[in-house]
């Protein structure tokens, strides 16, 4: 229920931590939605005097100085490589444009960097979106590490991804679908030039390539029918299925669907093929082993440095309720496969051989059916047969291990208290050390000798950018300039990390993003964002689907709070909401709203909250409880815990108890639909038809309940989207729907173009 008469805002003083990333100075913003200041009564400190030189919050002479210095320095360094200065590349820096959803979609999206083993070159995947065609294309770019010069390696009209280096650093394998390809295939291109050569022609498609040590053979994955032993039969059955007159599908066991697709009776298997082409050799199919059917990728297997063994992730629990991925090692000389983690009923994933071949690293969880259990770094000594936990006292999850050249340490990107940092883990001492600090660094890749380390660096005001990282001090040097000229035209607002007192007196970390030209003598509406998961964490990164800077452009102060249950703050904090998704996150959300209401630059009469997935659940939960928000946004919301049994995962039962037995309290006390009698807050409901993680019935049920209650509400339905709104034009529409809705209830800038007519408009 919304606040009534005397909703009281209890003030919580917050300690703030600046995140002055690479901002570009621009003209003062329009201050959309700002009002004259209210009474400035007692309030908390606006900077932390205990930390000399650190400004905390929107105080001081110019809040826009936060975030300007580092981005200006970064862009200046990057543009030097092109012979341009900031003023030459963008002569009207002081009159920059705001970040709109349209501008955001013009930015290139970088992923999957890969350093060549010899350290001389780096590959990176660059995605460009075409609004007219409503699709994105991936292209592989090649960087010379000596001078950061770059060139496209694959054609502009192709869609190429998953590039990996051959051990000799002379060839690259990648996945593409070209010409008359009926499915994606593995291609190989020489660094010396020439056309890419297709090395697979399998009707079921190929993905996740990795090289064997001889640089003459490539491994790949394909989803095939296990009862068919040749590719001609695979293609024939595929055609029969697609041409069938009957559309019915049947299952005798779960799962039946995953994310946005229905599952069939195919299995994921590993193959090996020569770079000269020919018939692929089946590796796992003859042994009766299959990799996970859902989203198996390159992280699910690895090849030993001598090429004589592979390590694989194999699901040993086919119940469909709580999968148990184990690590198998499979000799390629005909020996028997062996499960090296049979004693752990929880997931073991991400096997990686050390360069010297002595060790096999992987991640291990220990709680069955709980995806947010801490992933521990395990190392198996292949020579001694022993295994141990590395850095067991490190209270963060460790995944995707990257071995050092001497096989004595591992580097990994760690979700750490609101930031993704690179850490080094020493095998000898078991100690960890942070390589990077502020802003986020992910997808690290290292040369064979360990001298070249690259990663993708990002923040709230910087999309992922290829950088070279000095492993000694974490200093990042920009390599890519794909987005620099466009970024230089954008007048970003500032952002910072604050802490406030939440449920049970806990200190809750929260990211706060301010509109460009923020003026602390004025009042602004608030848009409080509720993250998904719930065991997720908002980090200092560029969020494409819920971009705080885009919301700032509409005139709002925007914030993400990492409430109880969030990841990156230790396992106890993550586990705090087990068996009760509602109480602590709800209280943390109310305390966040109170913290903002106590600030003189927030209009407590114009506050909104919204989120997706679990964030949508939390918005739906707020609907039935006391809260201070004038409107709510519920995207892909879990509304009815009982009907969530139609989701694509079944771990809910083991984690919370069966609702027909001992879990009744959880389902009744935490399901938002039980609060329907109190619903009276205007709510925007959004859902995609292809969302099998949170099925669309939740959105329909929530909207119909609001309508039956006579509550102002709007249902936005995407028949071709899943849990996320991913298509270019649908995303723009999604942002416009939210902008129009928020403007109606808390003010701010409304869309310039009218929204499409409602299918059933309210007169």
Image: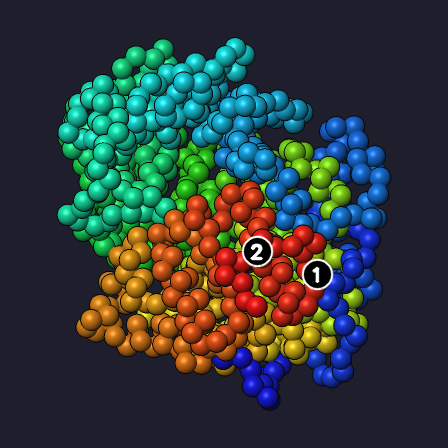
Callout 1: SS: loop
Mark 2 element type: loop
Residue 609: x and y in percent read 55, 68
Q: Is residue 144 toward the left or the right of residue 567 in the image?
A: right
- Which residue sits at x=22%, y=68%? 658
- Quick one: label 1, few (<14), some, or many (20+) residues within 10 Å? many
Residue, disc 2? 757
What residue is rendered at 50% in x and 74% in y? 711
User: How far across and down, in percent of the image, does residue 623 sit?
Assistant: 47, 74
Q: Which mark is residue 720?
A: none
- Circle 2 packing at 10 Å, graded few (<14), some (14-19), many (20+), is few
Vertical arrangement, residue 422 with respect to residue 216, above or below: below
Q: Quarter-wise, where is residue 428 in the image?
A: top left
Q: Quadrant of residue 48?
A: bottom right
Instruction: State whether residue 346 is above or below residue 214.
Output: below
Q: CA distance from mark 1 to mark 2?
A: 20 Å
Question: Is 510 rendered above or below residue 281?
Answer: below
Q: Position of residue 191 (x, y in %)?
A: 52, 15
The label on residue 749 is 1
In terms of sequence position, does the residue under pointer 1 or pointer 2 come before the other? 1
Q: Does residue 270 appear anywhere in the picture?
A: no
Q: Is residue 248 visible?
A: yes
Residue 285 placement, left or right of 157: left
Q: Nearer the viewer, mark 1 or mark 2?
A: 2
Q: Are marks 1 and 2 in contact (CB under 8 Å)?
A: no
Residue extending farthest bottom: 6
């Amino acid at each position: 229920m919304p606040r009534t008469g005397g909703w009281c805002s209890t003030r919580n003083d917050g300690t703030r931590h600046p995140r002055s990333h690479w901002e570009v100075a621009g003209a003062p913003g329009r201050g959309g939605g700002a009002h004259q200041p209210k009474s400035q009564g007692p309030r908390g400190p606006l900077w932390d005097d205990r930390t000399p030189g650190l400004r905390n919050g929107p105080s001081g002479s110019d809040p826009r100085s936060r975030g300007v210095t580092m981005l200006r320095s970064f862009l200046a360094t990057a543009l030097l490589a092109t012979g341009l200065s900031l003023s030459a590349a963008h002569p009207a820096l002081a009159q920059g444009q705001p970040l709109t959803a349209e501008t955001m979609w013009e930015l290139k999206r970088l992923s999957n960097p890969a350093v060549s083993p010899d350290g001389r070159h780096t590959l990176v995947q660059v995605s460009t979106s075409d609004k007219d065609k409503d699709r994105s294309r991936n292209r592989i770019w090649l960087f010379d590490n000596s001078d950061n010069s770059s060139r496209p390696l694959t054609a502009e009209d192709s869609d190429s991804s998953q590039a990996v280096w051959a051990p000799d650093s002379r060839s690259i394998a990648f996945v593409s679908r070209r010409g008359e390809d009926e499915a994606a295939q593995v291609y190989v291109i020489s660094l010396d030039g020439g056309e890419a050569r297709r090395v697979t022609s399998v009707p079921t498609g190929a993905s996740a390539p990795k090289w064997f040590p001889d640089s003459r053979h490539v491994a790949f994955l394909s989803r095939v029918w296990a009862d068919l032993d040749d590719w001609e039969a695979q293609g024939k059955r595929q055609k029969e299925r697609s041409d069938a007159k009957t559309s019915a599908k049947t299952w005798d066991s779960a799962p039946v669907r995953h994310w946005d697709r229905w599952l069939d009776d195919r299995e994921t298997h590993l193959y090996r093929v020569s770079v000269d082409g020919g018939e692929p050799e089946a590796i796992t199919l003859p042994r009766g082993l299959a990799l996970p059917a859902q989203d198996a990728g390159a992280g699910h297997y690895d090849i030993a440095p001598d090429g004589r063994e592979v390590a694989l992730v194999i699901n040993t629990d086919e119940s469909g309720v709580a999968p148990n991925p184990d690590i198998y090692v499979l000799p390629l000389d005909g020996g028997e496969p062996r499960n090296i983690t049979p004693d752990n009923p929880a997931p073991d994933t991400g096997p990686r051989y050390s360069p010297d071949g002595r060790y096999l690293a992987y991640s291990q969880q220990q709680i069955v059916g709980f995806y947010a259990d801490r992933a521990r770094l395990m190392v198996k000594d292949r020579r001694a047969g022993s295994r141990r936990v590395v850095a067991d006292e490190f209270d963060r999850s460790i995944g995707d291990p990257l071995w050092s050249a001497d096989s004595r340490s591992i580097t990994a990107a760690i979700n750490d208290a609101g930031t993704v940092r690179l850490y080094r883990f020493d095998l000898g001492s078991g100690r960890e050390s942070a390589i990077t600090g502020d802003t986020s660094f992910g997808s690290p890749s290292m040369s064979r000798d360990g001298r070249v380390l690259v990663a993708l660096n990002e923040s709230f005001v910087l999309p992922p950018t290829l950088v070279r990282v000095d492993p000694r001090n974490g200093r990042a040097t920009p390599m890519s300039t794909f987005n620099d000229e466009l970024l230089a035209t954008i007048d970003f607002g500032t952002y910072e990390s604050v802490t406030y007192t939440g449920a049970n007196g806990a200190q809750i970390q929260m990211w706060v993003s301010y509109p460009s030209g923020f003026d602390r003598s004025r009042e602004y509406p608030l848009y409080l964002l509720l993250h998904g998961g719930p065991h997720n964490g908002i980090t200092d990164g560029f969020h494409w689907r819920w971009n705080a800077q885009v919301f700032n452009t509409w005139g709002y102060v925007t914030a993400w709070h990492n409430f109880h249950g969030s990841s990156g703050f230790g396992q106890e904090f993550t586990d705090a909401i087990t068996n009760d998704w509602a109480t602590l996150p709800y209280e943390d959300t109310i305390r966040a709203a109170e913290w903002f209401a106590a600030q003189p630059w927030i209009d407590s009469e114009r506050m909104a909250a919204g989120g997706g997935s679990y964030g949508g659940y939390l918005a739906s939960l707020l609907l039935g409880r006391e809260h201070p928000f004038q409107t709510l946004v519920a995207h892909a919301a879990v509304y009815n815990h009982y009907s969530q049994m139609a989701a694509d995962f079944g771990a809910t039962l083991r984690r919370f108890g069966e609702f027909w037995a001992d879990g009744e309290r959880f389902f009744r006390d935490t399901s938002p639909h039980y609060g329907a009698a109190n619903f009276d807050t205007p709510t925007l409901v959004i859902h995609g038809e292809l969302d099998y993680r949170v099925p669309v019935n939740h959105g329909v049920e929530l909207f119909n309940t609001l309508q039956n209650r006579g509550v102002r509400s709007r249902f936005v339905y995407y028949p071709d989207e899943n849990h996320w709104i991913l298509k270019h034009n649908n995303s723009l529409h999604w942002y416009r729907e939210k902008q129009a809705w928020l403007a109606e209830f808390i003010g701010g800038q409304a869309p310039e173009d009218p929204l499409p007519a409602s299918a059933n408009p309210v007169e």
